[in-house]
Structures are given as C-alpha cells and as structure tokens.
Image: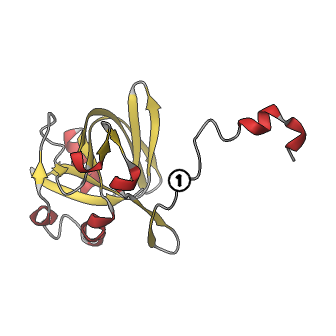
Amino acid sequence: PVVIVGTVTDDKPNFMTVAWITKLSADPPLVGISVGATQHSAKGIQQTGQFSINFPSIDEAELADYCGLVHGYKEDKATHVDIFRGALETAPMVRQCPLNLECRLQQTVELGKQYFFIGEVANVYASERILTDNKVDMERFRPFVLTMPSNIYWSLGDEVGEAWSMGRRLLEHPEDRR
C-alpha cells in the first residue's frame, strides 16, 4: 500500500510517501518500512526514534504523490498537511488520512542504500468515516497501491474471498491438487 510517513527532522515536521511497508509481528505489533538512506525522513527517524504511518484513501492520492515528489530539505511539505499529534510528540500524523499509526523505532537495518526501519505500533487512530461496526471497512476506506516499474497507482478491486478459509476445499479434497 501507499503510505505517508511522518517524523520530525531538525525540529520540523516532515512527510514522505513510502510504498515499501510490511506487517512484521502481531505481538508485539511491529511494522517495517524501507526508506532511502539519504532521505530527509530517514534522518528524522534516526534523530527522534519515532515516526507515523498514515494510510491515505484514493481521495488523498494527490497529497500522497506530492509528498513523494519533493524533498523535505528543499520544501516544507507540512504546509499541505493538517497535522495532528497523539501520544508520541515526534510522530506527526496526517489528519487527511483516515488511518494512522504511531510507531517507536525498535531497530534499523542497513540494506545497501536503504534503511529498513522496524517500528513498534504504539497507537492506532481511525477516522469514523472508514469504520463499520468499529472495524476498518475497506470499501469505505479505499486504500491504493503502487506498482513498479510502471509507477502507477491502483485502487483495490472486489473482494476475492476469506483468508484462511477459501483454500480449505483443497485440504479436504487432495485429489484436486495439481
């Protein structure tokens, strides 16, 4: 998915778009993001040990693309962001995004010209507009992804099926396996 990472770099809020993100653990709740070592946000994450992960819907695609076009050391991207803060002072979040995570840096892995930042999720914030029965409703949320090398954003399509369930038929009927 496409996300906007927020941190404080040189005492100023900074935001950048990231499309290399993954869940690492549920207990403790850990996520990982890959950020170029020369990025202004990488410097901020290292300075503060905190960052936010903000999930835009397709309605915020223009803002997400903008945050990936310009460098924080050249332009103050925060002028286009409605910033809010939770419990972590140096993990500014993007109010325009309907889903936000506050993270504490747990580990940094150097991977060539990239840093892989592993963060423990401290808090989760979700806008009421994307919730149904107090759970994130993907049809209301409408996140999007980036494909490479085409560099195209895509919205999610139709539901495919229930995870850890739709493959049961092959367990029950091994003769159908190929």
Q: Position of residue 172 (x, y in %)?
A: 80, 32
Q: Nearer the viewer, residue 121 or 176?
A: 176
- Residue at the far right in the pictured view: 175
Q: Where is residue 52 in the image (x, y as percent from the top left)?
A: 25, 45
Residue drawn at (72%, 35%), measured in percent from left and top? 168
Q: Which of 41 and 60 is in front in this view?
A: 60
Describe residue 119's horizontal placement relative to residue 97 as left or right: right
123 shown above or below 57? above
For mark 1, what is the residue?
159
Residue drawn at (9%, 50%), measured in percent from left and top? 11
Residue 121 in which image quadrant: top left
54 shown above or below 107? below
Q: Where is residue 23 in the image (x, y as percent from the top left)?
A: 45, 40
Q: Nearer the viewer, residue 60 or 20?
A: 60
Neighbour class for label 1 at 10 Å: few (<14), some, many (≥20)?
Answer: few
Residue 39 appears in the figure:
no
Describe residue 4's horizontal placement relative to residue 118 as left or right: left
Residue drawn at (24%, 50%), measured in percent from left and top? 129
Secondary element under disc 1, as helix, strand or loop, is loop
> Quadrant of the image for the N terminus?
bottom left
Residue 104 appears in the figure:
yes
Describe residue 110's horizontal placement relative to residue 134 as left or right: right
Residue drawn at (27%, 71%), measured in percent from left and top? 62
